[in-house]
Image (cartoon, rainbow, N blue to C red):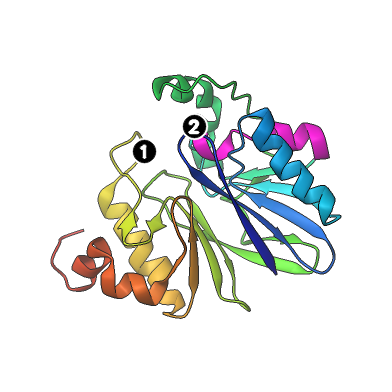
Amino acid sequence: MNIVKFVFNPIQENTYLLWDESLECIIIDAGNCSAGEDSRLTEFIAKYGLKPVMAVNTHGHFDHIMGVNYLKQTFGVKFALSSKDEYLRATAQQSCAMFGIAAVVDVPEIDIDLDSVESIKFGNTELMVIKTPGHTPGGVALYEPQSKQLFTGDTLFRESIGRTDLPGGEYGTIIRSILTNIITLGDEVTVYPGHGEKTTIGHESLYNPFVVEAINGEINY
């Protein structure tokens, strides 16, 4: 499985393009929100002859879904998001304005409810859908077990975790998601977060202060 990262929009969000030997591809957390960013993504897809089939979202915050409508209009992709984050999809434009970003965010209806499927497929690749609520109610991680690659959205970052002070967030829930559904995948798993640089579960188990204090029983979550 091939992976390329784009950093999009004023929030500096990570958008991931994944493809395999079939040349079918998916876009995880499409955050492109300008003509220039749209072109960067489209030109890469054209250069490698890729066939976009799905826009998949780890959660529904506006900075992660700003480019979904462009992908649907340009390539006819299906849109996958947990229905538990439908309220975020529906209010993306207002959320964008609250953060002072003057971009049009017209997000299409959900085609695939990630809350009701165990995996998603493209080409010859299958990604497990792992529920990770806490940053948002419908947060998920996407895991490719053969290559041990995990896309965590805003649940787990390099030496940090996602915010829980926004509507729908809850600190105890995100910690339980990380300890129960992410850390247990194994130290060698590579983590591709929604912001910042990639890491590994092993690194986070040793150096992420939020994870370490939970593992050590220093907090009641």
Q: Position of residue 168 (x, y in %)?
A: 36, 38
Task: State whether residue 42 is above or below residue 21.
Answer: above
What element does badge 2 sit on? helix
* Quarter the C terminus occupies: bottom left
Q: Amino acid at mark 1?
A: Gly
Task: State whether residue 11 is above or below residue 26.
Answer: above
In the picture provided, is 6 more to the left or to the right than 11?
A: right
Task: State whether residue 36 is above or below residue 18.
Answer: above
Residue 68 visible at all: no
Q: Position of residue 156 (x, y in %)?
A: 39, 58
Of the numbered discs 2 and 1, the one sitting upstream in the chain is: 2
Mark carried by residue 168:
1
* Quarter the N terminus occupies: bottom right
**In the image, what residue occupies the spot 40% across and 54% down?**
155
Quarter of the rendering containing residue 182: bottom left
Crowdedness of circle 1 by 10 Å Cα count: few (<14), some, many (20+)? some
Q: Could you say which is closer to the camera, residue 168 or residue 197?
A: 197
Q: Could you say which is closer to the camera, residue 16 or residue 37?
A: 37
Q: Which residue is mark 2?
A: 88
Q: Which residues are magenta?
A: 62-76
**In the image, what residue occupies the spot 52% across and 27% down?**
92
Q: Name the outermost residue toward the left.
A: 218
Residue 157 within the segment the image draws in magenta: no
Query: Given contact means CB atoms under 8 Å apart, are the residues at marks 2 and 1 in contact?
Result: yes
What element does badge 1 sit on? loop
In the picture provided, is 116 more to the left or to the right than 190?
A: right
**In the image, what residue occupies the spot 79% across and 31% down?**
73
In the picture provided, is 99 more to the left or to the right than 130?
A: left
Q: Main secondary structure of the magenta part?
A: helix
